[in-house]
Amino acid sequence: GGGGEAYANYDQVVKSVYQRAWVLPDTEADEAIVKVRVTIARDGRVTSSSIVRGSGNAMVDTSIQRTLERVTFVAPFPEGSKDKERTFPISFSLKAKRLIG
């Protein structure tokens, strides 16, 4: 279905919820990027989440897996949405997280 600006904003909401929930691991790694995919139902429930591509750093990958398990609800879809669920790609960057906290 459509989307437009409301979905662009919702996409940012989804990403920020996951970024805030991520607890950095105690690792000396300078950079690690993990790509995940999360599927969210219209009512805001997370129906599935998985790591699509790990970083190769077990501590970072485990911290992301814990984040995926921790987040079970985001927010209901924008009003007027006709989709039953949507899937969102999210990239977690160790370097970016350290910079913004």
Image: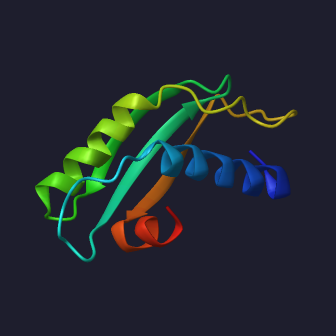
Residue that appears at 55% across and 33% down:
40
Horizontal side, residue 44 vs residue 59: left or right: right
Q: What is the residue that sits farthest to the right in this orientation?
A: 80
Q: Image height check: is 37 above or below 74?
A: below
| Nearer-the-camera pick, 12 or 86 | 12
User: Please, is residue 67 above or below residue 56 in the view?
Assistant: above
Image spot of residue 94 (x, y percent) = 34, 67
Q: Left of 99 or right of it: where is 74?
A: right
Residue 8 coordinates in the image, percent (x, y): 74, 57
Q: Name the quarter where the N terminus is drawn.
A: top right
Report the side of 75 relative to 89 (left or right): right
Instruction: Measuring from the top left, give residue 69's x and y in whole percent.
Output: 35, 30
Q: How many numbered markers are drawn?
A: 0
Image quarter of residue 80: top right
Q: Is residue 44 above or below residue 7?
A: above
Compared with residue 81, is residue 19 higher up or lower down, i.e. above or below? below
In the rendered image, which quarter is residue 54 located in?
bottom left
**Image point (23%, 56%), residue name:** 60
Q: Which residue appears at 66% of the width and 52% of the height?
A: 11
Q: Nearer the viewer, residue 35 or 100?
A: 100
